[in-house]
Image (cartoon, rainbow, N blue to C red):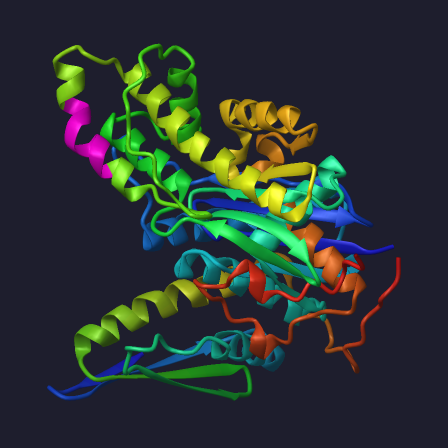
Amino acid sequence: MEVNGDSTDATAVLNINYESSREAEIVQKILEVDAEPSRSKTKKVFSVSGRNLQIQVICPDVRELRISLDSLMDHLHLVNQTINKFGPPQPPAKKLCLKNQD
Amino acid sequence: MTIIIGMEGSANKIGIGILKNGEILSNPRKTYITPPGLGFIPSETAKHHQGCVLEILDEALREANVSLKEVDAIAFTKGPGMAAPLLTVALVARTLSLMWNIPLIGVNHCIGHIEMARAITGANNPTVLYVSGGNTQVIAYLEKKYRIFGETIDIAVGNCLDRFARILMLSNDPSPGYNIEKLAEKGKKLLTLPYCVKGMDVSFSGILSFLEERANNLLKKGEYTKEDLCFSLQETIFAMLVETTERAMAHCGSSEVLICGGVGCNKRLQSMMNTMCEERCGRLYATDERFCIDNGAMIAQAGYLMFKCGITTSLKDSWVTQRFRTDDVLVTWRDD
C-alpha cells in the first residue's frame, strides 16, 4: 500500500493478491456495486491484472481517506473470509438461467 | 424443489434462514445486545454482524443439511434499515452468488415480515399491523400492492419502547420491549399520557418526551413505580394502534387482523387487539418471537414467492437502501 497526500488531495493504492484471477474479478464486481455516499467526494478505481486486484482510493484529504479505507478494509476482509470459508469459486455459469420450478 | 437462503441484518439482529419449497429447514439468529441505557449505533452493529455472519451461515447450512450447490436463490434484505448492517449482509450474499452462480433476490424487509406472518398463520387477506423498532404501519392489500393506511409520523413504536427502557435503565437482554412487557404485567396505577392519533397516523415522540421529563421525578417521589410506568406506556400506545387498525378494518370491510414485526410478539398488544377483533366478530392472527422478530426465514419466504414469479435481482442492482417503502413493491405473487 502506498499513500500520497498533500493538503488538497490524498490517494491510497491497495494491491491484493488472490488465489486466482477469477477470485480477484469477483471481489472487484462485489465492491463496485455500491455508489459512494452522496456527500462523499471519494473516488475508487478498481482494476484486475492476473491474480492481483488493485484499488485506488482518491479523497479530498487524508482524514476522509482514513475513514474511506477503514470501511473498505472491513468490507474486503468480510468478502475474503467468505471466499475462504465458502469458496473456492465454481467455474462461471455459461448462462445464468432461472430454474423456475417447484 | 426450490431451496432459498434468506439473509437478514437490517437492524441489531442478524439471521439466516433456509427454506425448501416454503418449509423452514433452519433459521438461526444472533442479536447485538448493548448495555442498559445504550442503544445500538450503525457502525458498531455492522461490526457485530461482520463478526458472526459466516458462523451463522455455516450453522444454517449444517442444520438444514444443504450444500451451496443445491441452492436456487439467495434472498437478502435490500432495505429499509441501517445502511452499514444492511451492506454487511449484502456483501456476503453477493460473494456467495458470484462464487456459486446463484441468482440474488433483493427483498423489502417489511414485505418479508408480512409474507412470513401470512405463511405461518394462514391468514388470507388480513389488515396488517406491522410494528417494530424501525417501523409502525397499518397495511392492507389492494391491487398488487400492500397499501399503507396509517403509519407513525415520527418514531416507531418499538423505538419509543426501547428508549423508554433506556430511561429506566432496563436490560436490553433479550430485548428492551420484552423487559417492559414483564414489568407492565405487575403495573397497577395508570398515569395519563398524551394520546396521539392524528387521523390514521400515530405519533410517539411526544409521549416519550413527556415521560423523559417526568419519569425519574415520579419514581423518586414514589407516586408511581417502574411497573406502573411501563403499564401506562403500553396501555396508551397499544390503544392508539388498536384504534387505527380497527378503522382500517372498517374501511376495507376486513375481518382479519395480522400482527407482525418485533413488537408484535407482545402479549398485551395481542390481547388488546383480540378484544377488538372479538367485538367486531373478526379474527386475530399473530405469531411468536421466532417469526415476529427479524429473522432470515422471513426474507427467504418473501424471496421464495418472488422467485416463483421469476423475479431476481442483478448484481448491479444489489445495492442496499435505508429508505424502501412497503408500497414501493409490486406484489406480483398475489392474484387476488
Q: Residue at horizontal 63%, vertical 32%?
A: B286
Quarter of the figure with residue B230 = top left
Q: Quadrant of the N terminus of chain A?
A: bottom left
Q: Judge whether residue B17 can be spotted in this image.
A: no
**Residue depicted at 67% across the width and 60% down the height:** B74
Tell me: B146 left or right of B90: right
Say if the magenta span includes residue B213.
yes
Q: Is residue B306 above or below residue B268?
A: below
Horizontal side of B34 relative to B132 (left or right) equals left
Locate residue B295: give its quadrant: top right
Question: Is B321 inside the magenta-drawn segment?
Answer: no
B244 relative to B277, above or below: below
Q: Residue at x 50, y 77 (%)?
A: A33
Left or right placement of residue A11 versus residue A75 in this view: left
Q: Position of residue B311 (x, y in %)?
A: 72, 69
Residue B282, horizontal then vertical, whole percent: 69, 31
Number of numbered discs: 0
Q: Main secondary structure of the magenta part?
A: helix
In which quadrant of the rendered image does the C terminus of chain A lie? bottom right
Q: Nearer the viewer, residue A26 or B160?
A: B160
Above or below B45: residue B225 = above
Q: Can residue B213 be seen?
A: yes
Q: Nearer the viewer, residue B53 or B329?
A: B329
Q: Which residues are magenta?
A: B209-216
Residue at (53% x, 52% y) in the render: B149
> Does B242 sit left or right of B39 as displayed?
right
- Residue A31, percent from left and from top: 48, 75
Front residue of B223 and B119 = B223
Relative to B238, say whether B103 is above or below. below
Q: Looking at the picture, how far across and down is residue B262, in whole percent?
A: 51, 38
The front one of B83 and B158 is B158
